[in-house]
Amino acid sequence: MRALIALSLALGLSSISSLSTAQSVLPESSRIGTFKQVEGEAWVGPAASRRTASSGDGVQVSDRLTTGKAGAATITLKDGTILTMGPDTAMDLSQFAFDSTTQEGNFLLDLLQGSVRVVTGLLGKVNPELFKVKTPTSVVGVRGTDFIVETEAAR
């Protein structure tokens, strides 16, 4: 009897564990990028339902990405764009479309607070007018390939 209870408990815990892992795995069709490195605390999703980010996790359009006070994260997008989030940063991946055949698409990042270093990929090089970073006080049109944007939290 005890062996049966222990086996049931082990199976139940392993199924719960696989469910939480499955939630962080995105289908390839909706994935626009991947966390390459995560240090400290980093999350994906709105505050009420956010999940902890780990290296290898996917990101998709409309995701809110957040780091803690000692956190940092690097995300690589499908076009080769690299986003490096500093500590205490919140940003939304508002728009991203990329056609690997034509190399056309668009990108809009809403930086809500904190800092992000952006090294543009093909989108920023082929269509710089469609590559934008928005802060609470401005919209930055990108004409370079490596830049840092920083903003304070809205008051």
Image (cartoon, rainbow, N blue to C red):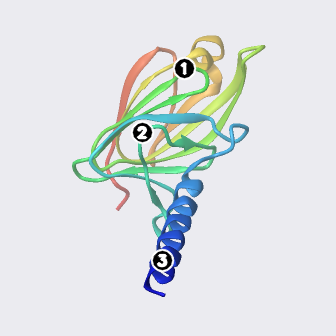
Q: Quadrant of residue 77?
A: top right
Question: Disc 1 versus disc 3: distance between alpha carbons?
Answer: 44 Å
Crowding near the residue tagged with mark 1, few <14, some 14–19, many ≥20 C-alpha atoms within 10 Å: some
In percent of width and height, residue 67 lies at 34, 49
Amino acid found under the numbered disc labelled 2: Ser
Residue matched to label 1 = 80
**Residue at (22%, 48%) from the top-left corner?**
70
Amino acid found under the numbered disc labelled 1: Gly
Amino acid found under the numbered disc labelled 3: Leu
Q: Are marks 2 and 1 in contact (CB under 8 Å)?
A: no
Q: Quadrant of residue 132?
A: top right
Residue matched to label 2 = 55
Residue matched to label 3 = 9
Helix, strand or loop for disc 3 = helix
**Residue at (46%, 59%) from the top-left corner?**
51
Please give left or right for residue 139 compared with residue 85 in the image. right
Circle 2 or circle 1, nearest the eye? 2
Q: Residue furthest bottom?
A: 1
